[in-house]
Image: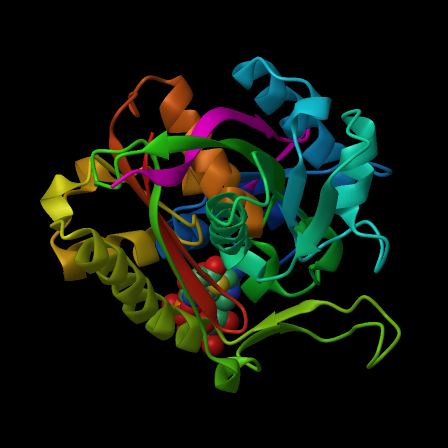
Amino acid sequence: MSKLRAVLVGTGTYLPARVMTNDDLVKLVDTTDEWITARTGIKQRYIAADGEFTSDLAIKAANIALDDAGLKGSDIDLIVLATATPDQTFPATAVRVQTAIGMNHGAAFDLQAVCSGFIYAMATADNFIKAGQAKRVMVIGAETFSRILDWEDRTTCVLFGDGAGAMIFEAQIGEGTSEDKGILTTHLHSDGQYCDLLYVDGGPSSTQTVGHLRMNGKEVFRHAVKNIAEAINDSLTEAGLEAEDINWFVPHQANQRILDGTAKRLGIGNECIVSTVAQHGNTSAASVPLAFDVARKDGRIKDGQLVLMEAMGGGFTWGSALVRV
Ligand code: ACO
């Protein structure tokens, strides 16, 4: 039976010019390249310049995605921008992107699910398309986490970086089978009882400050492997597929040990997992589209393949999206 599908037609990413290596961090906090590498797999991260905002990164990624798709901003009718580090409390960073890409119709809004934001935004785009309320949706994950880090806290500041990634999805008619191109399934979860394990200690309503990221790393780690495995299983079960049917797993790039732990739990070979954690660090909502784009542009992810994306973040939030590209 024919079914509307959200088909990926373009991708784009942007990373700030400044690279901060582990050795650079040694000059700021009591840490070593060996500790960071062994515990996280991270070797470097990108940091936005002074005066370079989340919207600047998002606009660059969006324009590259438009070029990749052969589209103009006016061809897009919805922007869903996932970020936990907006330029301002309001207006939404998405409306800045809307204007900058020359889109003066439709709608643009921000979405907040921290590191799971891109998966939440993809699910939102998919549902707008399936409901017939949007024809082409720009999904963006963009973050400047460097602005909410406590640069004196070695337990958190070594983990995160800045960046942006965009994907454009277009409504196309499929057959309603897992052979269709496009987003095949999405699954979202949250559990607010864990909101104090990973949070920012400020906000407009509570402290009238932006605040800094705080985390109980050990507890986050413990929940991450379990929740990510659950999100992957949700997608596989609904699609009636096994892990070996998936060509590529594109996980949220939090920590190489979380990636390895999940792969081991599900029996997934490391050769099917896209890892950019060493180069990008954890870029929160930007990490999935950044990793996807690297593997697509270096030729690993090929047209027609099945890709399973997943993420877990503060809230806790977690989820997965199964896409035939
Ligand atoms: N450099 C050197 N030593 C450090 C550093 C550092 N950057 N940070 C902490 N340490 C020290 C600690 O002070 C502690 O010292 P002590 O034994 O003298 O007290 C020791 O290293 C061990 O600290 P732990 O916190 O127990 O280290 P752990 O093995 O748990 O690793 C880490 C910490 C990497 C944060 C880990 O818990 C983790 O990966 N958690 C997941 C968190 C994550 O990825 N969050 C991202 C956001 S959520 C998401 O995206 C899924």
Q: Is residue 191 above or below residue 323?
A: below
Q: Is residue 49 visible?
A: no
Q: Nearer the viewer, residue 84 or 120?
A: 120
Give me the residue at 49% from left, 47% from top.
122
Give me the residue at 20% from left, 54% from top.
236
Using residue 127 as the reference point, say whether residue 16 is left or right of it.
right
Q: Is residue 5 magenta?
A: yes
Q: Is residue 221 above or below residue 237?
A: below
Using residue 27 as the reference point, say whether residue 299 is left or right of it.
left
Q: Is residue 21 visible?
A: yes
Residue 120 image position (x, y, % from top left)? 51, 56
Q: Nearer the viewer, residue 220 or 103?
A: 103
Q: What stretch of residues is rendered in magenta?
A: 1-21
Determine which quarter of the picture holds residue 207. Answer: bottom right
Determine which quarter of the picture holds residue 184. Answer: top left
User: For the N terminus, which image quadrant?
Assistant: top left
Give me the residue at 37% from left, 67% from top.
224
Q: Is residue 28 magenta?
A: no
